[in-house]
Image: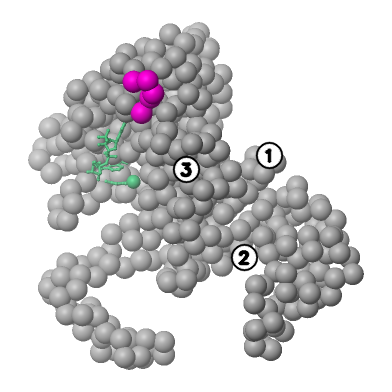
Amino acid sequence: MPKFEKLTLPNEGEIITFNQGKPNVPNNPIVPFIRGDGTGVDIWPATQIVLDSAIKKSYKDERKINWFKVYAGDEACELYGTYNYLPQDTIEAIKHFGVAIKGPLTTPIGGGIRSLNVALRQIFDLYSCVRPCKYYSGTPSPHKNPQNLDVIVYRENTEDIYMGIEWEAEDNNCLELINHLNNVVIPKSKNLKNRSIPDGSGIGIKPVSKSGSQRHIRKAIEHAKRLSGDKRHVTLVHKGNIMKYTEGAFRDWGYELAVNEFREDCITERESWILDNIQKNPEITIENNARKIEPGFDKLTNNKKAFICEEIKEVIASISNSHGDGKWKELILVDDRIADSIFQQIQTRPQEYSILATLNLNGDYVSDAAAAIVGGLGMAPGANIGDNAAIFEATHGTAPKHAGLNKINPGSVILSGVMMLEYFGWDEAANLITNGLSKAIEQKKVTYDLARLMEPKVEPLSCSSFAEEIISNF
Ligand SMILES: NC(=O)C1=CN([C@@H]2O[C@H](COP(=O)(O)OP(=O)(O)OC[C@H]3O[C@@H](n4cnc5c(N)ncnc54)[C@H](OP(=O)(O)O)[C@@H]3O)[C@@H](O)[C@H]2O)C=CC1
Ligand SMILES: O=C(O)CCC(=O)C(=O)O
Ligand SMILES: [Mg+2]
C-alpha cells in the first residue's frame, strides 16, 4: 500500500486487480473518485447517491463500493498548494486501486497547464476512450429519428496531437525546429520539394504509431465480436486523404489487423462487395466484378486495372470458401470513412453505423456531435480503458457557467458509473439505473437541458432532484 500524504483511506474494502487486461473485482472494491471542477460539485454527489442506491437495492450488503476521495484540479490546489493540480497521492491511489471515476476538469486555452484529463489517460496508458451514444426513449432531440443512432465512439486516447508535443511561435526551440525542417529535412524529402514552414509559425507534432493504432482497433473489434446482427460493424474513421502517414496509416493498420488477427471473424467492405457480386452471379468475370467495386474502372490506367483484378483474385483464392455464399454476412464488417463524411453520415444514415474507431482528435469531435443527436452532453458517458487501469468520466467538460447551481444534468456521469458497473460485471445494478433513468425521462422529469427541448415545455428538475427521480424509479 502506498503512503499517502494527505488522503484518508476508507475503513474497509479491497483492491481491484488486473489479469490480461481484465479486472478482477471483489465485492467491496475501493474506488478512488475525483469530484471535478465546475459542475463537478453538482454532478458528482448526484452520481454517488444513484450508484450507491442501485448497488444496495441489487445486492443488499453483499456488494458495496468503498469510495476513496482523491484530488485533482482546483480542489487539489486548495489541499496541496497552488499549482499542484495533479498530486502524486492521486496518481499513486489510482495506480494502486486500478479503477477510478471522475468529474470534469478545467483546461485553460492557449497557455497555462496542460490538460489533466489527457494527462491521466497518458499516465495510466488508458489507450481506448469508449463513448457510447444511444437514445433513451422520450429524450427530446433536434433530430427527427434520434433512436436510429446507436454508436460507440472508440477514440484512441494516448497519441495524435493530444500528446501535446508542440512549440510556441518564436520560442527558440521552435525557431530551431523550423530552421532544421526548412533547411535539412524538407529539402531531403522527395514529396516535399519547394515547401517551407512560414516564419512565425507555432509547431505541433502528430505522432500516430502502428502499435498504438492496432492495440486500440483490436479493442474495438473485440467489442464488435460481443455485439449481434448489423451492430457487428467497425468503421475506421480517418482523414487519410490529407494526412496520409498518420490518419491514412491508421486506416491501413486497421485493415491489416482485421484480416491478419481476426480473419475468421471479419470481412472488409471491399471483400464483401466482391463476394456478394459472385453470389449474385457465380459466372461473373474478374473484370466485371472489378467494374462493380471500383467506380470508373474502365477509365483507369492498365496498371491500376491489373492491380484491382489481382485484389479480386486474391480475395477469391483466400476467403471465397470460408466467407463466400453469404457466410460473410454473419461476420464483423470492417469499413472506413473519411472523418468529415462521418459527421454527415451519423446525421443522415445513423442506422448504418455501430462502432466508430477513431484517432484522438476525430473521436473528441465526433463524440460531442453524436451526443448532440441523442439528447446532448448531459447524456454522454465514457470510459478510458487500458490494460492495467480504467477511469470512467463523462464526455462533457466543466460547463463553468452552470457550476454550483444544482442545475446541470448528472446523466453523463451517472451513465459513466453504469459503464463502470458493467465493467465490474455488476449488471443488475447497472440495469436498475438505466431503467430508472429511462423512466424519469419518459415521465418528463428531467433537468433544464432536456426540458428546454421538450414540446410542450416542462418545468425542469434540479440536478439532485433528477438523481432522486432516477432512484425513485428503481
Ligand atoms: N473530460 C473532461 O474533463 C473535459 C473537460 N473539458 C474542459 O471543460 C471546460 C469547459 O469546456 P466547454 O467548452 O465549456 O465544454 P463543456 O462540455 O463543459 O460545456 C459546454 C456546454 O455543453 C452543455 N453541457 C455540458 N455538460 C452538460 C451537462 N452535464 N448537462 C447538460 N448540458 C451540458 C452546456 O450547454 P448549455 O449551456 O447550452 O446548456 C455547456 O454550456 C474547459 O476547460 C474544457 O477544457 C472539456 C471536455 C471534457
Ligand atoms: O481535457 C480537456 O480539457 C478536454 C478533453 C475533451 O474534450 C475530451 O476528453 O473530450
Ligand atoms: Mg471533448
Q: Amino acid at mark 3?
A: Val
Marks 1 and 2: in contact by CB < 8 Å?
no
Q: CA distance from mark 2 to mark 3?
A: 22 Å
Q: Where's the N terminus, which quadrant?
A: top left
Residue nearest the observer in this picture, 238 or 461: 461
> What number is the disc on residue 256?
2
Q: Secondary structure at mark 3?
A: strand
47 horizontally vs 174: left or right: right
Image location of residue 445, percent across then percent down: 38, 15
Q: Is mark 1 within 8 Å of ligand 2?
A: no
Q: How would you rate the neighbour count of disc 2 (Cα within 10 Å): few for under 14, some for 14-19, many for 20 or more? A: some
Q: Is residue 375 above or below residue 296?
A: above
Stretch in magenta = 453-457
Seen at 66% across and 53% down, the residue is 333
Assign the magenta stretch its main secondary structure: loop
Residue 328 occupies which quadrant of the picture?
bottom right
Give the labeled residue for mark 1: 228
Q: Is residue 318 left or right of residue 269?
A: right
Which one is earlier in the sequence, the residue at label 3 or at label 1?
A: 3
Dot 1 crowding, Cα within 10 Å, few <14, some 14–19, many 20+: few
> x, y (%) of residue 28?
46, 19
Question: At which x and y percent is residue 55?
Answer: 47, 15
User: Is 138 on the left or on the right of 289, as rendered?
Assistant: left
- Residue 239 is at least partly visible in this image: yes
Q: Position of residue 361 (x, y in %)?
A: 37, 56
- Mark 3 → mark 1, Cα distance in angstroms: 18 Å
Dot 2 or dot 3: first in sequence order is 3
Q: Quadrant of residue 269?
A: bottom right
Circle 3 residue: 130
